[in-house]
Amino acid sequence: MRFLERRSPPHVGGGRDFVKARASRWARFVGAAAVVYALAGAVPLFAQGGAQGLHAGGGWVGDLLVGDASDFLDGGYGPWISLEWRGERRASLGAAVTAEWVRLADDTDEPTGARARNSLLSVSVGPTLGVWLGPVRPWVGGFAGVTLSRWSTEWSGQKGRGSDSAFAWGAGVGLQVRLTEGNHPASIGGEARLTDAGTLSFARAPAFDPPPAPTGLISRDVALLSLRVGVSVGL
């Protein structure tokens, strides 16, 4: 599989580059529109009566690439942060804005010393629905946003870098356990989510050929299976 990928050039011509650039811009536009739409739809929610609160959270996430991209890329891990407005009634709605950065495993070709690094930056927003069962809150949610892939390459003193972006959406389930009460309640929890991140470009180290220029760029449909753990505190 690596040998076949090595023979495949990343670009066919300027026409394809132009189409891809326009598609990338449209993906960013659609992702931004989805974020605005989700926030606008959450405004009536914020105006509801009852106890509600703003919570800041963060922790660690591990991502596993599934689908087409898993044939060429492993998963990775990194930090995540979130800002969530959620109700404190037994059954309550909420809305969360989340950002995460994941560095994927490096790809290195030992015979040539070529190396490629890839990472993913994701920003999403969406509603949540949870039920407090004493100090425990199971919940489900959906989200939409933008995923940005960034790559860098090194070979024989030559370096290159680039990026790509696409509209992303998905759903998740989680469990929170409240640790403290009061004006700034703290909780600990975890979440599993599945994300369709669209088509993104990545770099692969084995496909470096003279002259010294990376020819290992690949584009794949990306789906992510993520597991998050972390804490949140009421503001």
Image (cartoon, rainbow, N blue to C red):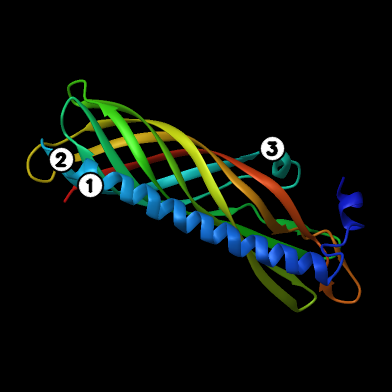
Q: Is mark 2 on a helix, strand or loop?
A: strand
Q: Is residue 149 visible?
A: no
> Residue 67 shows which numbered tag?
3
- Which residue: 38% across, 43% down? 126
Q: Is residue 134 left or right of residue 60?
A: left
Which residue occupies the extreme bottom position in the image?
157
Nearer to the camera, 127 or 186? 127
Q: Quadrant of residue 230?
A: top left
Q: Name the residue furthest top.
A: 133
Residue 42, position as x, y percentages in the image:
29, 45
Residue 131 at x, y = what percent? 25, 24
Q: At x 19% / y 36%, what residue is drawn?
A: 87
Q: How far apart are marks 3 and 1 (CA)?
A: 34 Å
- The image shows residue 25 at horizontal and vertical percentages of 60, 64
User: Within the image, what quadrant is residue 225 found in?
Assistant: top right
Q: Tell me the residue that label 1 is attached to.
A: 55
Tell me the kind of residue under disc 3: Gly
The local secondary structure at tag 3 comes to helix
Q: Residue 52 carries which label?
A: 2
Q: Which numbered disc, 3 or 1, marks the residue that appears first in the sequence?
A: 1
Foreground: disc 2 or disc 1: 2
**Marks 1 and 3: in contact by CB < 8 Å?**
no
Q: How far apart are marks 2 and 3 (CA)?
A: 39 Å
